[in-house]
Image (tube, helix red, strand yellow):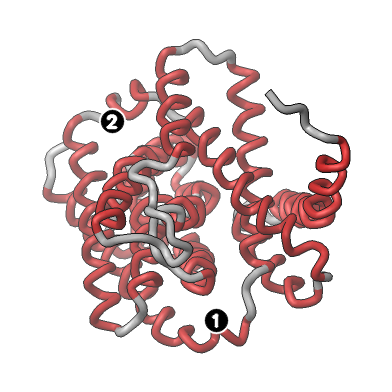
Amino acid sequence: MEAVRPEAVRSWLGRTGPGVAVAAAGAAAAMVINGWVPALSALTVAVLLGVLVGGALPQATAYGLQWATRKFLRIGVVLLGLQLSVGEVLRLGPGMLAVVLVTVLSGFAGTLALGRLVGVSKGLALMVATGFSICGASAIVAMDSVARSEKEDVATGVTLVTIYGSAAIAVVPFLGAHVFGLDRETLGMWAGLSVHEVAQVVAAASPAGAAAVGTAVIVKLTRVVLLAPMVAGMGVVERRGGVHAEGKRPPIVPLFVVGFLVMLALRSAGVVPGPVLTSAKDVSTVLLAAAMFGLGSAVRVRELVKTGRRGLVLGALSTLLVGTVALTALTVIPR
């Protein structure tokens, strides 16, 4: 085995270090802001900070930011698998699992159809469908690993998750309690089914009490479990469609998605100590925030504006679709 030369390591660090340091600083700032305003997800704040400062960053940071976005995202998604066990999912019962499945599949397929109707690119429609139906920004970037999508599509999808997920924090509890007359548990379930980021789900369910928040988070993380099969399915579709622009066939199942499933299995087996689970959750958030900052830094607002109006329409329609399907499924399917 050939030894790694010190000069090569120094060269790599010289190219990568500045960008990684900036991504880490962006993640730290996002975590601080999240501490001040818990309703704002650290991932949401991180991508917005990246968009704000991206155009002003020196070229020397570009390579490291790209590296951090790609690598930190994958590790962060792997660690997400430790946040839920199969036992917690099964305790929801077959009726509630059916509600989750119907909501995710209907939201995904319906948003793709709405994307064609509105006239956005296939890449943007896929990003919005993934983020709104499964688990927000992390799902969008995971799907990007197997799909033919542009950076602008990914960034726009994350931005729309931020806009409509934040709006849902106020809208979902108001409609649930004062318009639809939902009891606390059902309101928590609806929040877990229809709101995008975990932090947004917690904020939306909190007016209904701690028990509703707990239910909402479990329902939400059950949606996260569906990330793996959805990404794998899209990987199969994309491979049949040919190669990426860079000449590579997309993977059927990205290695980090396999890692996510392995972590889920370890959590389900009960072999991971509690302190490790707590630390893994924190590390996952920090890594995903750094990745989101890197993603945002590559965005140019002028490019986003070109598709902004249609994207906003698609986001509104997708939000309405997912929320309506979720509420209808909760009403119709016995739990």
Q: Is residue 223 visible?
A: no
Give the total number of marks visible in the rendering.
2
Answer with the quarter of the image where residue 30 lies: bottom right
Secondary structure of the residue carrying tag 2 is: loop
| Residue at the extreme top of the image, as rendered | 271
For residue 45, above or below residue 304: above
**Residue at figure coordinates x 22%, y 62% from the top left:** 109
Label 2: which residue? 92
Q: In the rendered structure, which amino acid carries the disc numbered 1?
A: Leu
Q: Position of residue 79 (x, y in %)?
A: 55, 33
Label 1: which residue? 304
Horizontally, is 34 left or right of 174 in the view?
A: right
Answer with the quarter of the image where residue 39 lies: bottom right
**Residue at figure coordinates x 50%, y 56% from the top left:** 137
Q: Residues within 10 Å of mark 1 (few under 14, many from 20)?
A: some
Closer mark to the observer between disc 2 and disc 1: 1
Disc 2 and disc 1: Cα gap in Å? Answer: 40 Å
Decide which of 229, 313 is in the foreground and name it. Answer: 229
Horizontally, is 67 left or right of 6 in the view?
A: left
Q: Position of residue 274 (x, y in %)?
A: 59, 17
Decide which of 235, 36 is in the foreground and name it. Answer: 235
Q: In the rendered structure, which amino acid carries the disc numbered 2?
A: Leu
Decide which of 294, 29 is in the foreground and name it. Answer: 294
Q: Position of residue 106 (x, y in %)?
A: 21, 58
Q: Is residue 284 visible?
A: yes
Secondary structure of the residue carrying tag 1 is: helix
Q: Quadrant of the C terminus?
A: top left
Horizontally, is 248 left or right of 37 in the view?
A: left
For residue 237, above or below residue 56: above
